[in-house]
Amino acid sequence: MAKSFAQLRVLAAKARLGAIIGTYHAKSGHPGGSLSAADIFTYLYYNEMNVDPQNPQWEDRDRFVLSKGHCCPSLYAILAMKGFFDWSELESLRHVGSMLQGHPDMKRTPGVDMSSGSLGQGISAACGMAFAAKLDNKDYRVYTVLGDGECEEGQVWEAAMFAAHNNLDNLVVFVDQNGLQIDGTVEEVCGIEPLDKKFESFGFEVAKIDGHSFEEIEAALNKAKTVKGKPFAILAKTVKGKGVSFMENQVGWHGKACNDEEFKVAAAELEAQIARLEAEV
């Protein structure tokens, strides 16, 4: 059953809390981009994709590839809330022997469709899945999330050419445009704009949205289903570190975990958000 926007906001806040819990216990990881993409993950898994936690390898499920694989902590939180594994597993993030590693592992983590982490490769895998669906006359759809800094990778554009050439209208590519990457702003490191025109020139239909608005996420995904013969790109403007005041728009939170005091502040902020949002449901 689809969730209301108010319910989705609660779930996204919980996913952000899960990402903070996981990276804190790991003493490493990538909270910034995990928080910026949490709303996208939430909508996909609760209101868009056809998946079954009791049968993760179901042949006709929709597929998801996290191309920016380092931002898996909030995805793991979503998978836990959906019932693919227990929430307590989040505290084992990046530990030796854990099912939850620093990048998605399709062989060890229920609900993960593709191992990823080397930037640029995830979208290629998603294209292969979408092409396989066409060859097999299957109706499942394929979704992938890239980082905006990731779009500096040449392989992204090779995959984009492949997608358009093969009319992969069952493929939706999200770009999480939080504007920051490990070395600074995307604009300063290697500017990618106009990104919409680039995707259009590679044969995509494009929508530009606020990546924290469930209303806009829903509208873009509904539009994607009406487009025939072309892949669809959704350029989602987001805030890196969204939901934790001292992390928002701070490049330093790309790849480090909270210390004890920072964790207390971040967890308290998110728990307060959850309580407030639950009161609005």
Image (cartoon, grey):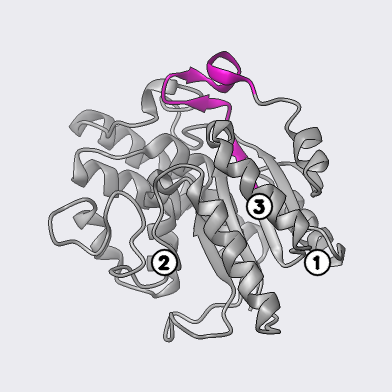
Observer-nearest of 56 and 121: 121
**In the image, what residue type sits under mark 2?**
Val
Q: What SS does tag 3 mark?
A: strand
Say whether disc 2 or disc 3 marks the residue closer to the N-terminus.
Answer: 2
Residue 160 drawn above or below residue 180: below
Q: What SS does tag 1 mark?
A: helix
Residue 278 drawn above or below residue 211: below
CB atoms of marks 1 and 3 within 8 Å:
no
Number of numbered labels in the structure image: 3
**In the image, what residue type sits under mark 3?**
Val
Observer-nearest of 260 and 19: 19
Observer-nearest of 227 and 262: 227
> Residue at left 52%, top 59%?
125
Q: Percent position (x, y) of residue 132?
A: 61, 74
Chain part drawn in magenta: 174-191
| Disc assigned to residue 225 | 1
Label 3 neighbour load within 10 Å: few <14, some 14-19, many 20+? many
Q: Percent position (x, y) of residue 240?
A: 51, 32
Label 1 neighbour load within 10 Å: few <14, some 14-19, many 20+? some
Q: Is residue 67 toward the left or the right of residue 222 in the image?
A: left
> Residue at left 76%, top 55%?
164
**Which residue is denoted by mark 3 in the rendering?**
173
Q: CA distance from mark 1 to mark 3?
A: 13 Å
Residue 105 visible here: yes
Label 2 neighbour load within 10 Å: few <14, some 14-19, many 20+? many
Residue 271 visible here: no
Q: Is residue 156 toward the left or the right of residue 97 in the image?
A: right
**Where the C terminus falls, by quadrant?**
bottom right
Q: Percent position (x, y) of residue 112?
A: 41, 66
> Residue at left 72%, top 67%?
170
- Is residue 202 inside the magenta stretch? no
**Which residue is denoted by mark 2 in the rendering?**
112
